[in-house]
Image (spheres, helix red, strand yellow):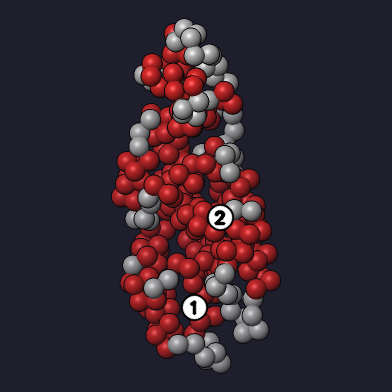
Amino acid sequence: MQNEGVKIGEVRDPLSPVHDLLHKYRISVADATIYRWRTGDSLGEETAHRILAALILEGKIEPKHVSFFSRMVDTGLQVRDYQQNLRHRYKSDGFTATIGINMGINEQDIRQILRGLRTDIVWTDASYPQFNDKIMYALHNAESDFVTAYTSSDLNYPSQINQAVVDFAEGIDDGTARGFYSKLYGSFQERTGRGAGIFTPYEFDAMNLYVTAILTILRLSPYLQAMLESCARGESIDQFAHSATDITGIPNDKSVIGVVRAVVLGII
């Protein structure tokens, strides 16, 4: 809490100055909570996150997601090109793990952040029709490269993977990012067991366009705006995760929201 500029005082100090300061951010806590902060029994991390979210929403500090996403995408493209094998197929095995190593971030966090970025793409596509053509162009190009790599006649891949890729490409995505990812997380995921993982190296071209051409225009995308508003109100992460899943069709959970929120707040 001290790091966010909130002077919590000593154990025997009056409580009202802390309450008054938190009230500026529309945050109220019990007296016992302030006491635990002062004794060191609680670090007040969740309240600190609420304050950071409020400051970003008020425009007093800038969100940190664009720089992080740009670095992650750049790292992924470098890793992908380095790992590309002689058959001109991008390797998915170890892809996210290597990104994590290069960035000094846990692989599971990278996976969750990628799921959050997919959610971001879908929510933005639904909220800003003017971006639909650009988003779908990028996703369909990635899909085309993916299909070519896995179905070329001179390559020998398991037939079940080949057919699943063909069916994925021929499936109807209704011209929306939600429709596209519904295919990826639907039957293709069920048939391959790791659909999103196989597609991820190709998806990075689409993510690169999204980050550089769209996120740089929007200070906060609809997904991240709603995430910070939920945080600032003190809602549970699970509650927002359910809302994000319902709106986008991309499975969100506490771990996804937690790590993406940390990116926006500049904690990681």
Depth check: 152 or 140 in front? 152
Residue 190: image quadrant is: bottom left
What is the C-alpha distance between the residues marked 2 and 1?
Answer: 30 Å
Horizontal relation, residue 49 to residue 187: left or right: right
Q: Is residue 57 visible?
A: no
Q: Is residue 261 visible?
A: yes
Horizontal relation, residue 122 to residue 202: left or right: left
Horizontal relation, residue 39 to residue 205: left or right: left
The location of residue 101, given as percent across then percent down, is 63, 59
* Label 1 packing within 10 angstroms: few (<14), some (14-19), many (20+): many
User: In the structure shown, which secondary structural element does the residue marked by tag 1 occupy?
Assistant: helix
Residue tagged by mark 1? 147
* Label 2 packing within 10 angstroms: few (<14), some (14-19), many (20+): some
Residue tagged by mark 2? 106
Circle nearer the N terminus (2, 1): 2
Residue at screen point 56% across, 46% down: 215
Q: Is residue 25 above or below residue 232?
A: above
Residue at screen point 43% across, 29% down: 232
User: In the structure shown, which secondary structural element does the residue marked by tag 2 occupy?
Assistant: loop
Residue at screen point 48% across, 9% down: 12
Q: Which mark is residue 97?
A: none
The location of residue 222, given as percent across then percent down, is 44, 41
The location of residue 99, given as percent across then percent down, is 61, 61
Quadrant of the rendering where the C terminus is positioned: top right
Residue 250: image quadrant is: bottom left
Q: Amino acid at mark 1?
A: Val
Q: Amino acid at mark 2?
A: Asn
Depth check: 105 or 71 in front? 105
